[in-house]
Image (cartoon, coloured by chain):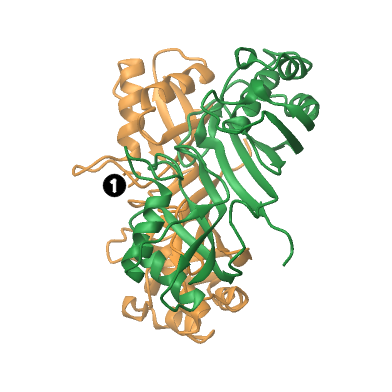
Chain colours: A orange, B green
Amino acid sequence: MTRFALTIEFDGAPFMGLQRQSHGPSVQQSVEDAAHAVTGETVIMHAAGRTDSGVHALAMRAHVDIAKPFEPFRLMEALNARMRPDPVAVTACEVVPDDWHARFSCVGRAYVYRIANRRAPLTLERGKAWHITRPLDHAAMDRAAQSLVGRHDFTTFRSVHCQAQSPLKTLDRLAVRREGETVLIEAEARSFLHHQVRSMVGCLALVGMGRWEEDALAQALAARDRQALGLNAPPDGLYFVKAVYPEA
Amino acid sequence: MTRFALTIEFDGAPFMGLQRQSHGPSVQQSVEDAAHAVTGETVIMHAAGRTDSGVHALAMRAHVDIAKPFEPFRLMEALNARMRPDPVAVTACEVVPDDWHARFSCVGRAYVYRIANRRAPLTLERGKAWHITRPLDHAAMDRAAQSLVGRHDFTTFRSVHCQAQSPLKTLDRLAVRREGETVLIEAEARSFLHHQVRSMVGCLALVGMGRWEEDALAQALAARDRQALGLNAPPDGLYFVKAVYPEA
């Protein structure tokens, strides 16, 4: 068996999420079905993150074990040819040691969240950003965001369906900036709780709109209570952008 | 009657083009139907350009004449509310003099063409760029492009359906640059022939792939013959980005 690390890009809109689901299409199923068609083997894909329905990825990392000999480039091309109808693409493929694990070896994850901040409805960006018509104070959002950075109990920002054993996480970076009518929120941590980024973004948006004071975010965090959550941002604007691994 | 100038953004994918067509949906129909619903009047929209099926716009300019009194902002909001299911949005609206004409007053038009230059199939950019897998030499493309700048007979780069009286046009700018895996082609002129940008881009792509020598573009131009055209680029990558008007 050879272990291949894959870098995967996908448009999350048509999928029930990254993980295989019994009730609809998933990125995992798309990749695994393609790998089966190409190799004749039953292939299981392991990914760095488990993104929700509608969440996108620019560079998700994953691995598969395959017995049939393949040049990495040929495997990538073969998988892409099979997956073509689905908006999933393998953008890089390399052989990695057998103890390299896309999920368990991963020591850092980064997301970007896009908000289209303008009056007019979205056209070309439809499904690719969260549309907020009220003007956002991105500087106030960035200041408020800093109260979440560090090691905290993120119970407030955690889905009731979250399977993590502990609500304690260390948020390494949360930064808000504006590029024209787009407000971008960048989040980095070793790992995140289920819905954590969307929950943090939802509350930051309330600060940006002036519906929450800047210090309300710190209060919501301190409450350690899901009921203190202001708003969960929709999946459309969320992109998994980077998985970090220790240098080999 | 008050004349309103509109700035319009649209995703061209679901439309038969900007101009009203008997055989399918158009941007013009979407705007005019919304204007009729809002005002009760029969409204005709005049636009700076007539983009083809599948071509997008970031900032098309157009005008409409409306008898019912409207604040420009309210008109924009009402049109957007009515058009919402279609990927068309009015991003700006202002009152202009009665002799201001979106098409006939326009003294400059600019397009950007996007090529996604990579092996992997497109996911998030599907329908938003031309996918070319062979590596493109963007510097060679940019050098070749300069032979088209200036006043020329563009018969080679003109659709057989073009209705312009003369094939003579002055191309003010044609520039090719790369941003990562995206090759961007910017074209500016007072006006363009039908399919001119897509025809120029198609031939530039042949140069970029090494299938045409750099001077082949000048030879194709000199031939003044549609048969000398190498390739017509698909509409997916074409964006109308700017219409220029004399200062009031």
Examine the rendered structure and indicate whether residue A91 appears above or below residue B107. Answer: above
Q: Is residue B188 left or right of residue A215?
A: right
Q: Residues within 10 Å of mark 1 (few under 14, many from 20)?
A: many
Residue B226 on image: x %, y %: 61, 17
Q: State the SS at label 1.
A: loop
Residue nearer the viewer, A121 or B21: B21
Residue A94 on image: x %, y %: 54, 26
Residue drawn at 31 percent across, 21 percent down = A36
Residue A125 on image: x %, y %: 47, 53
Residue type at mark 1: give it.
Met
Residue nearer the viewer, B189 or A111: B189
Which residue is outermost to the left?
Answer: A23
Q: Is residue B175 left or right of residue A151?
A: right
Q: Quadrant of the C terminus of chain B?
A: bottom right
Residue drawn at 31 percent across, 79 percent down = A227
Residue drawn at 48 percent across, 34 percent down = B122
Residue nearer the viewer, B85 or B197: B197
Q: Is residue A117 left or right of residue B43?
A: right
Identify the residue under disc 1.
Answer: A16
